[in-house]
Amino acid sequence: MKILVTGSKGFLGSAFVQKYKSDYEIVHIDISKAKKILGYKPENPQYTQEQFHSSLKDKINLMS
């Protein structure tokens, strides 16, 4: 039986693959492999100083 495991480089996915790879045919894929296959190249977002500082201020307030 074939089993498709998505997120195979993550904590749960990698443990699953290790446990069942000898008993089943495991096909595994992770986001890094998917990005290469699909040619995904995200653009770097450009933030203004006001946006950056506002976001940083919100994060600091959450930690307080």
Image: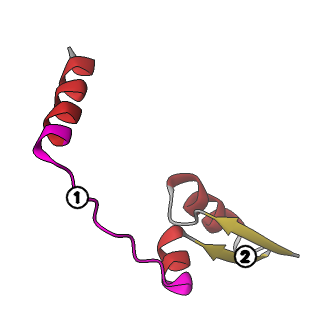
Q: Which residue is more in the foreground, 62 or 54?
A: 54
Question: Label 1: few (<14), some or many (≥20) within 10 Å?
Answer: few
Q: Which x, y percent locates residue 7?
A: 58, 62
Q: Give the side of residue 52 with respect to residue 43, left or right.
A: left
How far, Cα to Cα, is label 2 from label 1? 40 Å
- Residue wearing tag 1: 46
Q: Amino acid at mark 2?
A: Ile
Q: Which x, y percent locates residue 28?
A: 64, 74
Q: Amino acid at mark 1?
A: Gln
Q: Which x, y percent locates residue 45?
A: 28, 59
Q: Is residue 53 magenta?
A: no
Image quadrant in which you'd find residue 13: bottom right
| Residue in the image at 47% along x and 73% along y | 32
Residue 40 higher or lower than 6, as above or below: below
| Residue in the image at 24% along x and 28% along y | 59
Q: Give the side of residue 14 with respect to residue 57, left or right.
A: right
| Residue in the image at 61% along x and 74% along y | 29
- Residue wearing tag 2: 26
Question: Label 2: few (<14), some or many (≥20) within 10 Å?
Answer: some
- Report the quarter where the N terminus lies: bottom right
Q: Which residue is more in the foreground, 14 or 64?
A: 64
Q: Please tell me how many numbered marks the rendered image carries.
A: 2
Residues rendered magenta in the picture: 36-51
Q: Give the side of residue 23 with respect to residue 21, left or right.
A: right
Element carrying mark 1 = loop
The residue furthest right is 1
In primary-sequence order, the first of circles 2 and 1 is 2
Element carrying mark 2 = strand
Q: Is residue 49 magenta?
A: yes
Image quadrant in which you'd find residue 27: bottom right
